[in-house]
Image (cartoon, grey):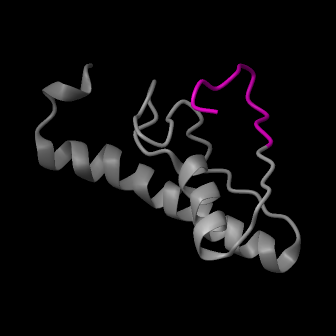
Amino acid sequence: MPLFLLPAFLLRWRVLDPMLTATEGSILAVCAAMRLGWTVNLSGGFHHASFNQGGGFCVYPDISLAVHYLRTRLGVRRVMVVDLDAHQGNGH
């Protein structure tokens, strides 16, 4: 079923809000990684989205936002993203 046929409140509640929460989890994971040395966010990994647009089923660019957060808020200069998906993401 195409998502644009859903009422806006339902789309927000069942699709967009959970993805936004997962994106927040990615940012929290990079903060924890700075303290602990490494972390994993199993709900994130929207690797089809780039910083300025979504792609595939990925609405929010959690990886790009997490890298941006590291650089702008925490002063990190170099970041390594390890994508273990079975295919290549087009956002990175």
Picture residue at 70% right of the left edge, 66% below the top: 30
Q: Is residue 32 above or below residue 80?
A: below
**Is residue 2 toward the left or the right of residue 57 in the image?**
left
- Magenta stretch: includes residue 89: yes
Of residue 67 and residue 15, the one placed in the foreground of this image is 67
Q: Is residue 27 above or below residue 14?
A: below
Magenta-highlighted residues = 82-92
Q: Is residue 37 above or below residue 14?
A: below
Picture residue at 68% right of the left edge, 56% below the top: 41
Q: Is residue 27 above or below residue 59?
A: below
**Is residue 72 toward the left or the right of residue 86 in the image?**
left
Q: Position of residue 84 (x, y in %)?
A: 79, 34
| The image quarter in which residue 2 lies | top left
Picture residue at 76% right of the left edge, 57% below the top: 40
Of residue 88 and residue 85, the one placed in the foreground of this image is 88
Point out the residue furthest to the right here: 37
